[in-house]
Image (cartoon, helix red, strand yellow):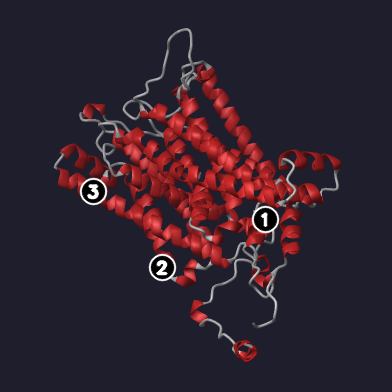
Amino acid sequence: MSAETSTLSAVKIAPPPKELEREPLVLKNRSIGWISDHIAGICEGKTPKWWWPAFLISATVLLMMAGMITYLISTGIGVWGLNQPAGWAWDITNFVFWIGIGHAGTLISAILFLLRQKWRTSINRSAEAMTLFAVACAGIFPLIHTGRVWFAVYPGYMVPFPNANGIWPQFRSPLLWDVFAVSTYGTVSLLFWYTGLIPDLATLRDRATNKIRKMIYSFGALGWTGSNRHWSNYEKAYLILAGLSTPLVLSVHSIVSFDFAVSVVPGWHTTIFPPYFVAGAIFSGFGMVLTLMIPLRSLCGLHDVITVRHIELMNKVILATGSIVGYAYGMEFFIAWYGGNPYELYAFKNRAFGPYWWAYWTMISCNVISPQFFWFKKLRTGVAFTFIISIFVNIGMWFERFVIIVTSIHRDYLPSAWGYFRPTYVDVLTFVGSFGLFCTLFLLFMRFLPVIAIAEVKGVTPQADPHHPLGGAKGGDH
């Protein structure tokens, strides 16, 4: 046995070919202590110089939205540009847009966690926070769209509470399904985000030097000590929430698409909408993740944690979902032609060549053409180029929702019922103000909470692998 052991110990295993080597998820062999210090230092250190101007600008834009909503409520929805026949316009467009933005967070956290994709660890925390903030922005628009906003708190108006007047919402309406779907999605996403935060809140608690900060983080950490029992319960809870969140990713935007698909309006009444909307939501969500994470990576010095490999993998998802969206655009025209319904065919011809042709071709350029550049590795790994394309994706997905909603209803069956929707300044400034709410919440989040999951990033380092020489392995090369 001793001779055999010495023979085996003399054998050295050749490293894998260069083509099969993968870039590590944390560069420069950063230690576990460095990860804690660097990520926690973002919210523990002095406020960066760039943070205050960014916060003041976003807060000002948020106040502008509050002013527009106050003006809307005090005056009436006649201050918007919508009218007959376009009874839905910017408000529902913005609602669907923001709900779509929120899909990447739960996808990265839940589905990629269940698929054991370790690259999610550097981006899931910010993506989850982005989900919550996007849902908050989305919830504003259906509320103010109802007109009499003060009735929203009444029993039976939006949520079916028992009430003395016997008024109940219409359960056969997909608009009510939205209320349940979005509120469930927001609740589960909040629980999922908070559960993942608990170990990191304990880290911030143990590092805190200020009594008030220590007390706040202690309250949030729920007595976490990092014991084996705590980790076991944490991993079970995280897995259960991931399992609950996964069908929500697929169901929520499917239900949002039912707002249109269950109607009899040409251009809306199609069964392709649910998978098409889900793919589009993931597409736009990953675009927004890149739009946020690339500046954050540069401003906070996170190049070793959010690597080019992370950016490339997200670009591959954008390429895949963008291609699915492009296929859906083509199939819509094919179905309209093959179905033989002249009204359906006219609706799609009107989208491409009618008075809103500029919106349709902007959508095609941003959503179908721009992601195709990611077939090339050099462009897929280019950080500046990726940032530009991510902005195009966001623009294109907003125009997609605008094209679906407005171009389908601005021309009715009779030419006497045709119209042209033009947004007013209240429409535009309310939408711009929603970005102020989103950015304000995100800036506050990154100032007081870790933007990257410290515990999860530590788990994908070589030091966490007991079989790795940098971890628990012994014996040098053996």
- The answer to whether residue 390 is seen in the rendering is yes
Judging by the rendered image, the residue that carries numbered circle 3 is 333
Q: What label sits on residue 375 in the rendered view?
A: 2
Q: Residue at x 53, y 44 (%)?
A: 240
Find the distance from the CA under tag 1 to the CA under tag 2: 33 Å
- Give the image location of residue 100, x and y in percent: 46, 44
Vertical arrangement, residue 140 with respect to residue 192, above or below: above
Tell which of 354 and 331 is nearer to you: 331
Specify the quadrant of the image occupied by residue 419: top left
- Regarding mark 2 in the picture, which secondary structure is present there? helix
- Regarding mark 3 in the picture, which secondary structure is present there? helix
- Give the image location of residue 341, x and y in percent: 16, 39
Find the distance from the CA under tag 3 to the CA under tag 2: 26 Å
Q: Quadrant of the N terminus?
A: bottom right
Judging by the rendered image, the residue that carries numbered circle 1 is 455
Is residue 38 rendered to the left or right of residue 269? right
Tell which of 320 and 239 is nearer to you: 239
**Three-letter code, disc 2:** Trp
Are the two marked residues, 1 and 2, in contact with CB atoms closer than 8 angstroms?
A: no
**Three-letter code, disc 1:** Ala
Are the two marked residues, 3 and 2, in contact with CB atoms closer than 8 angstroms?
A: no
